Image (cartoon, grey):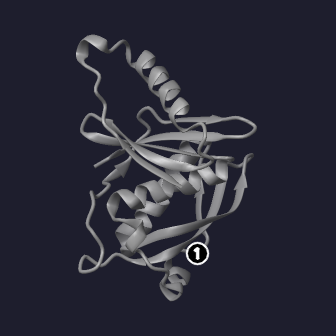
Amino acid sequence: AAIRRRISTRTLEEEGTDEENIENEYAHEEEDNDDEEEGFEYLDHTADIQFHSWGLDISQALINLIKAMFNYMTDLDLILIDTNMSSKVAQSITAQGHDWKSLIYSFMNEWLFVFHDTGFIAKELDILSIDRTSFTITSNGMGEKMNIAKHTQGTEIKAITYSNMNIKETTDRCDIWVIVDI
């Protein structure tokens, strides 16, 4: 999966309305990663960070969104798979919403809660089910408990936000943008 960090170089004179900036940013980002089937990247945002994840379908985009979140907190390359810990704390993680945005918020919030409650970092995720009618997701994660002695410490994520949250789904691609409070 592609992982990129992007620094914004726009000046105040170049900026338009918030809506224009969002549309221009999304159009620019899609051009940059059209050839990549799945991945995630970090986009600068005032005092926060924006995750952009994508995949061939919504499941891949959601998996990459959670990977982006955990990778921002520590380097996922250093996370091993502890099957015992994974089976205890990261099985059948279920989130529910009343629409797509609330479902994405709830999904990320559930995984963030798992981290804050247990220290568990998911390196791999499986989406077991997505119900598009009841807006429910069930997933499993594989990884291990974060250990400062062996894992690099990134930036802690305090909360998920609805600010500028967007989802764009077509027949062959899904993109999700979420800003988190750091």
On the question of residue 37 being in view, the answer is yes
- Horizontal and vertical percent position of residue 47: 24, 39
Is 12 in front, or is 77?
A: 77
> Residue 77 falls in which quadrant of the image?
bottom left
Left or right of 148? Residue 135 is right
Left or right of 96? Residue 85 is left
Residue at 44% in and 26% down: 25
Numbered disc total: 1
Residue at 55% in and 32% down: 30
Vertical side of 176 occupied by 63: above or below? below
Left or right of 113? Residue 181 is left
- The residue labelled by disc 1 is 91
In the image, farthest residue toward the bottom: 84
Is 136 in front, or is 65?
A: 65
- Horizontal and vertical percent position of residue 147: 30, 79
On the question of residue 99 being in view, the answer is no
Q: Quadrant of the N terminus?
A: bottom right
- Horizontal and vertical percent position of residue 89: 49, 78
Disc 1 secondary structure class:
loop
In the image, farthest residue toward the front: 35
- Horizontal and vertical percent position of residue 144: 43, 79
Q: Amino acid at mark 1?
A: Gln
Residue at 59% in and 48% down: 97
Residue at 39% in and 60% down: 71
| Residue count near mark 1 (Cα–Cα under 10 Å), binned few <14, some 14–19, many ≥20 | some
